[in-house]
Image: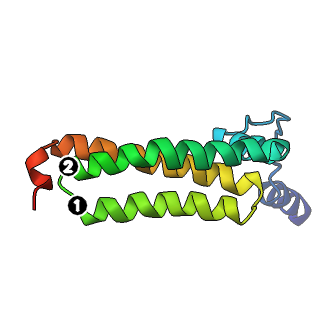
Amino acid sequence: MWYKIALKMETILQQTTTASFTNEQSKPSVIPKFFNWCEGQDENRFGWLAAALGGHGCFITPITMFAIIMGGNHIFFWVLALTAMGATLVTNLAAMPTKITIPIFVVSILIDIAIIASCIAIGFDITKTYV
């Protein structure tokens, strides 16, 4: 009798679990794909150097500075714009790999676009530039 009770308790205590595993691989997100693409751009590093220094230094930063001046010369915008350009310049002159220089270049462009949008939202006024 006690044997039957022990068997019943054993089946109660030892519950069986079934695990189902799927072999689906999740799709990688955009950020790891972007960093993998950046690593593959090492053979084009001089092109990226020219784009970063030429495009950023001769086109995007002057437009950003013009927007800052017309938006009222806020010191916070000047610090952001010069830091973004400086980060791009330093990483390229330090000859860092493209997996570092391209993301910094993209982030600095996004910072400049945000500054321009903020200055447009504040409003352009030429009288703010008078001393």
In the displayed structure image, the side of residue 25 where residue 80 appears, left or right = left
Residue pictured at 76% horizontal, 40% vertical:
37
Q: Position of residue 78 (x, y in %)?
A: 33, 61
Vertical arrangement, residue 86 with respect to residue 113, above or below: below
Q: Are marks 2 and 1 in contact (CB under 8 Å)?
A: yes
Vertical arrangement, residue 90 with respect to residue 49, above or below: below
Residue 21 lies in quadrant: top right
- Element type where label 2 sits in the image: loop
Task: Confirm whether residue 2 shows in the render.
Answer: yes
In the displayed structure image, the side of residue 19 where residue 49 appears, left or right = left
Residue pictured at 55% horizontal, 42% vertical:
55
Q: CA distance from mark 2 to mark 1?
A: 8 Å
Q: Position of residue 26 (x, y in %)?
A: 75, 36
- Considering the image in quadrants, where does the N terminus appear? bottom right
**Residue 74 marker:** 1
Task: Confirm whether residue 114 shows in the render.
Answer: no
Q: Position of residue 5 (x, y in %)?
A: 83, 60
Q: Position of residue 61 (x, y in %)?
A: 43, 49
The residue pinned by badge 2 equals: 71
Viewer-closest of 95 and 108: 95
In the displayed structure image, the side of residue 21 where residue 107 appears, left or right = left
- Considering the image in quadrants, where does the C terminus appear? bottom left
- Element type where label 1 sits in the image: loop
